[in-house]
């Protein structure tokens, strides 16, 4: 299983919800996705990023030391629906495992509430704020076929696309947000 890079068309497709019948199979896929996320030291991964158009997100935003082995407590989120956005928004740089080598500043609400399903098929409610809320919105975007580029106006997008092409040409790998620094990517 490898990370699909932008501009692959699978990243622009809307994902299908998971049915209870396909849950056992999708739970296996979700666990493989978690392995991939940890391999690239990401804080989140959505199924289209491994080439599957299904509504599956893996998330682990816990902070860890660069030198220490990372504790693995992934959260699995299926069929998420945002039920509430907070009123406040914030601009911050984001990285994406599918868009290595660059960061993009995106304005997002700082608080969200989500209805979703867990790996056992149970309904779950998630409230998230700050970085968690940002990471979740980034992943839910992926399920809608939206990448960071689609958040930008035409001029900024063409600048960032050029920057991404240069980063790719310089050998940027998933998990790297610039050639000098490594931030968390989702
Ligand atoms: Zn991403």
Image: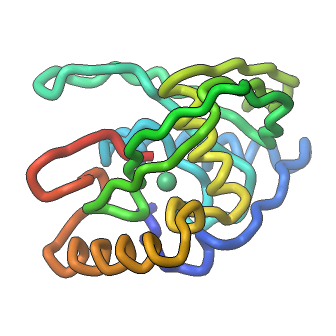
Q: Where is residue 145 in the image (x, y as percent from the top left)?
A: 68, 65
Instruction: Tell me the residue at 16%/21% (across/down).
Output: 68
Instruction: Tell me the residue at 42%/80% (across/down).
Output: 158
Instruction: Tell me the residue at 16%/72% (across/down).
Output: 171
Q: Is residue 77 visible?
A: yes
Report whether 108 appears left or right of 68: right
Report whether 10 appears left or right of 59: right
Occupied quadrant, residue 104: bottom left
- Tag count in the figure? 0
Report whether 174 appears left or right of 34: left
Query: How are the residues colored?
Result: rainbow
Report whether 93 appears left or right of 122: left
In the rendered view, would you say 33 is above or below 165?
above
Occupied quadrant, residue 159: bottom left
Q: Can residue 28 be seen in this view?
A: no
In the rendered view, would you say 152 is above or below 86?
below
Q: Where is residue 8 in the image (x, y as percent from the top left)?
A: 52, 79
Occupied quadrant, residue 124: top right
Q: Where is residue 59 in the image (x, y as percent from the top left)?
A: 53, 33
Quadrant of the image containing the N terminus: bottom left
Instruction: Tell me the residue at 29%/51% (across/down).
Output: 175
Q: Position of residue 128 (x, y in %)?
A: 63, 21
In the rendered view, would you say 95 is above or below 73?
below
């Amino acid at each position: 299983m490898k990370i699909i890079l932008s501009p692959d068309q699978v990243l622009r497709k809307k994902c299908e919800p998971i049915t209870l019948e396909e849950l056992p199979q999708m739970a296996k896929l979700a666990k493989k996705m978690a392995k991939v996320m940890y391999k690239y030291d990401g804080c989140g991964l959505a199924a289209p990023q491994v080439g599957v158009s299904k509504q599956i997100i893996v998330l682990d935003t816990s902070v860890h030391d660069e030198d220490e082995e990372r504790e693995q407590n992934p959260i699995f989120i299926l069929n998420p629906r945002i039920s509430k956005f907070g009123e406040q928004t914030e601009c911050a740089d984001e990285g994406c495992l599918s868009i290595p080598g660059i960061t993009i500043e995106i304005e997002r609400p700082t608080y969200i509430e989500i209805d979703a399903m867990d790996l056992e098929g149970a309904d779950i409610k998630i409230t998230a704020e700050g970085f968690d809320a940002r990471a979740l919105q980034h992943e839910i975007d992926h399920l809608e076929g939206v990448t960071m580029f689609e958040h930008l106006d035409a001029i900024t997008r063409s600048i960032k696309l050029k920057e991404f092409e240069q980063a790719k040409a310089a050998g940027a790998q998933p998990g790297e947000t610039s050639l000098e620094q490594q931030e968390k990517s989702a």
